Image (tube, rainbow, N blue to C red):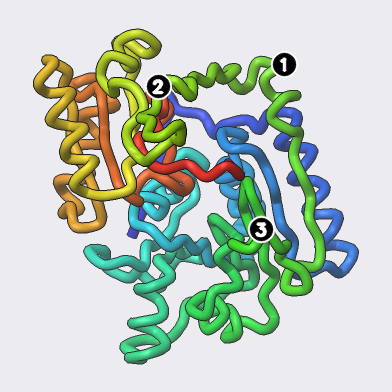
Amino acid sequence: LRKAESSRCRMIPDLRPFQIDVVNRVRERMAAGKRRVILQAATGAGKTTCAAHIVRCAVGLEKSVLFLAHRRRLIDQISARLFEFEVDHGVLMRGHRYEKACLVQVGSKDTIVSRCIDNQWYGLPPADLIILDEGRHALSPEYQNLIRHYPQARLILLDATPVQPDGAGLAPFADAIECAAPTSELIRAGYLVPVQCYAPGRTSNRRRQGKITKGIAGDLVEAWKQHAQDMPTVVFASKVAHSRDAVERFLAAGIPAAHVDADTPDDVRDRVFDDVEAGRIQVICNVGILGEGVDIPCLGCCVLWCNVSSRV
């Protein structure tokens, strides 16, 4: 049981004006009969905060809520945010004890499918409202298999980029979308910081017979020192070997760095994240771990040390 205890030193967060606006519009859509609504907001705009507010209001109406995500880190973040909003909740995920008493359950999609549907160890948690983080995954076979067990539940899909891999939208599965203020407006209002992008010129790439060939452009560590010295940094690599090589390069330059991937044990991964937030590690290199929904506010630099298509 994740019990949120009241504290005189802690207050429930207030939503920002643009968050209040998009939440109200989602409510209006549902009041008008739309049952599956996308809440779209830019990265960093606080989609989980909006959702936690909605969950708190639903609990006040004695409605049951199931908050779904597909990665452990996302589950932990959702749980932490519900704590901030003083919402008692259970967690359905490996390593946690399932508590049925709470109106709100935060669930790992894989755990629920395995324990409640495939093996039927216990029944599905009730849900008047389902909130799905990274909502574009709703059309995956696993999520479809899960959602079909809740024909009467209303559904809110949270996403910054609510499109399928081929670029198509989520209709007709979702029947409405409400968008928060765009990134440019949030930057002008001071809610998000402006972004500076640096990329190597064509002359930095390897050349052979007048054509650009595959290879690393520029020097990873020197570029970091030039543009992001002392900034907590995340490095994205396409292969584990490349990520580990990046760590070795940083360590050789005396810069604390660590690597995580899908095979990194949960406790080790959590310790690395804690070390980054505490300033003990300056660079975290990863493959497929920090790509969706991960909230590490201290990060100040992102390095794409991998192939990037012309469409990005």
Residue type at the position of mark 3 = Val
Q: What's the CA distance linking mark 3 and mark 1?
A: 26 Å
Q: Position of residue 223 (x, y in %)?
A: 33, 16
- Residue 11, placed above or below residue 28: above
Locate the C terminus and report the quarter of the image it occupies: top right
Q: Quadrant of residue 18?
A: top right
Q: Position of residue 209 (x, y in %)?
A: 41, 34
The mark nearer the N terminus, 3 or 2, is 3
Q: Is residue 80 visible?
A: no
Q: Position of residue 246 (x, y in %)?
A: 21, 32
The mark nearer the N terminus, 3 or 1, is 3
Where does label 2 land, which residue? 204
Q: Would residue 257 appear left or right of 35 to someone viewing this image?
A: left
Which SS class for mark 3?
loop
How crowded pointer 1 is (Cα within 10 Å; few <14, some 14-19, many 20+) is rated as few
Where does label 1 land, which residue? 188
Residue type at the position of mark 2 = Ser
Find out whether the residues at labels 3 and 2 contact each other: C-beta distance under 8 Å: no
Q: Would residue 238 appear left or right of 210 to someone viewing this image?
A: left
Observer-nearest residue: 7 or 240? 240
Q: Position of residue 107 (x, y in %)?
A: 42, 66
Identify which residue is drawn at 69% across, 48% down. Answer: 40
Where does label 3 land, which residue? 163
Which SS class for mark 2?
helix
Identify which residue is drawn at 18% across, 46% down. Answer: 241
Nearest to viewer (mark 3 / mark 2): 2
Q: Quadrant of residue 92?
A: bottom left
- Residue 43, placed above or below residue 174: above
Nearest to viewer (mark 1 / mark 2): 2
